Amino acid sequence: MAVKGFSCRIYGVLVEQDQVLLTRSRFLDREFVNVPGGGMELGEAPVSALKREFVEETGLEVEPVRVLYASEGLHLSTQMPMQIVSMYWLVEKRGGVLRTTGNGDDVVSLFWADVAAVPTGEMFPSDREFASRLDRILGAGKL
């Protein structure tokens, strides 16, 4: 299978009182769960992309703390197979107002889930890998 696309994705992991902020998003005819974030634009720095995506999807301004996890894989959810590099950053809230009703575009709603009970079955496989390890990753960092 020839891969003709490449994308770098940046996600923010906001944790408050052992709960993580998640999005319920829609792509084509499928709904899925993920942490806020998305694709970097050409020439955009990772931290700038993270801050931009987080505000667009949640209404919150965040500051990256550290990279929690990075992965690379083949994403088959689009019409064209795409190689995707994903980076998941721990973030801290700095301002803004949480918009739980989504962004009027791809994000349908936002919700909080226990870190130990993230609904991984509703995620794309590339994100499920990270989410299934989230409790251990955060525990190792001693938030």
Image (cartoon, rainbow, N blue to C red):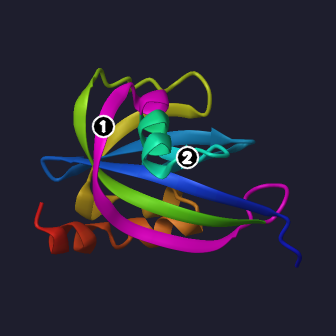
73 in magenta: yes
From the viewer's perspective, is 70 left or right of 18?
right
Instruction: Give the residue displayed 32% in from the left and 25% down from the top.
Output: 98
Instruction: Give the residue displayed 23% in from the left and 36% down from the top.
Output: 93
Q: Is residue 119 visible?
A: no
| Residue receiving disc 1 | 62
Residue nearest the viewer, comparing 142 with 120 = 142
Image mark for residue 38 = 2
In percent of width and height, residue 89 lies at 35, 56
Pick whichever of labels 1 and 2 is earlier in the sequence. 2
Identity, as a three-letter code, of the amino acid under mark 1: Val
* SS class, disc 1: strand
In percent of width and height, residue 83 lies at 71, 68
From the viewer's perspective, is 67 left or right of 83?
left
Say which quadrant the N terminus sits in. bottom right
From the viewer's perspective, is 116 left or right of 47?
left
What is the C-alpha distance between the residues marked 1 and 2?
A: 15 Å
Identity, as a three-letter code, of the amino acid under mark 2: Gly
Residue numbers of the magenta segment: 55-81
